[in-house]
Image (cartoon, rainbow, N blue to C red):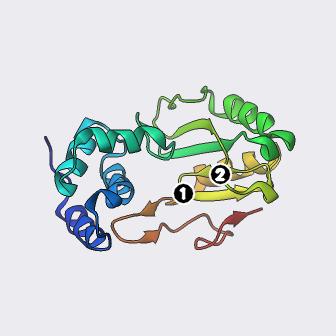
Amino acid sequence: MMALSEKAAKKLEEIRRLYPVPRSAVMPALYLAQQELGVINQEAIQWVSEKLDIPPVHVMEVASFYTMYYKKPVGRYHFQVCRTLSCALRGAKKLSACLHKRLGIKPGDVSKDGMWSYEEVECLGSCGTAPMCEINDCYFENLDESKLLKIIDQIEKEQPDLRFSAVDDKLGDGLKGYSKSEVMKL
């Protein structure tokens, strides 16, 4: 098994001290592993299991329950289109169709260059600003196809860091013209 970085291990020790029961730190530990590996694979499950001294099956149960843990590789920019009621009524299917056409991939696939992927997910908790999607770790709300295409064009041009660093406790640089510390709005 390849070890994750020493920085991630130190961060996990900090997190573990916040919880009286080590298994309570499974979710943040999985985030750390995903940040390091890009995916929750057997190596990530084993690392979390060893660091928290809990059975691998418990780690796998948590990882398989939540959609925010990637069980297979995703693109550098991963779109999660909310398909629950509010978003569905306000155009989520159109957003998915737009992504399919623009990126040339189906939900769950990764573009050949590794840049793009998308999936349809259940509620992301932004029903009042539907339809919306999360790109990596940033919310983009009140979307339509035109706005979504502009965002893709801007991402292609700027190649911004839209990921939250669980190790450094900070969000990347974000997309110019949008706040990086708040929910992204159009």
- Name the image quarter holding the C terminus: bottom right
Residue under numbered circle 2: 124
Q: CA distance from mark 2 to mark 1?
A: 11 Å
As drawn, which residue projects farthest toward the front?
A: 21
Is disc 1 placed on a helix, strand or loop? loop
**Spot occupied by residue 124 in the image (x, y as percentages of width and height):** 65, 51
Task: Please tell me which residue lies in front, 38 or 41.
Answer: 41
Image quadrant where one finds the N terminus? top left
Q: Do we see residue 162 in this rendering?
A: yes
Residue shown at 68%/69% (left/top)? 177
Which amino acid type corresponds to the residue marked 2 in the rendered image? Leu
Please give left or right for residue 24 compared with residue 114 in the image: left
Q: Position of residue 158 (x, y in %)?
A: 57, 58
Residue at image position (50%, 31%) is: 110
Whether tag 2 and tag 1 are in contact, CB under 8 A, the answer is no
Question: Which residue is farthest right?
Answer: 89
Left or right relative to 12: residue 99: right
* Helix, strand or loop at mark 2: loop
Q: Is residue 107 left or right of residue 57?
A: right
Q: Sequence order check: which comes first, mark 2 or mark 1? A: 2
* Residue 74 visible to an observer of this rendering: no
Give the image location of residue 145, x and y in percent. Answer: 80, 43
Q: Which residue is mark 1?
A: 137
Q: How many marks?
A: 2
- Snapshot quadrant of residue 179: bottom right
Q: Residues within 10 Å of mark 2 (few under 14, many from 20)?
A: some
Q: Quadrant of residue 93?
A: top right
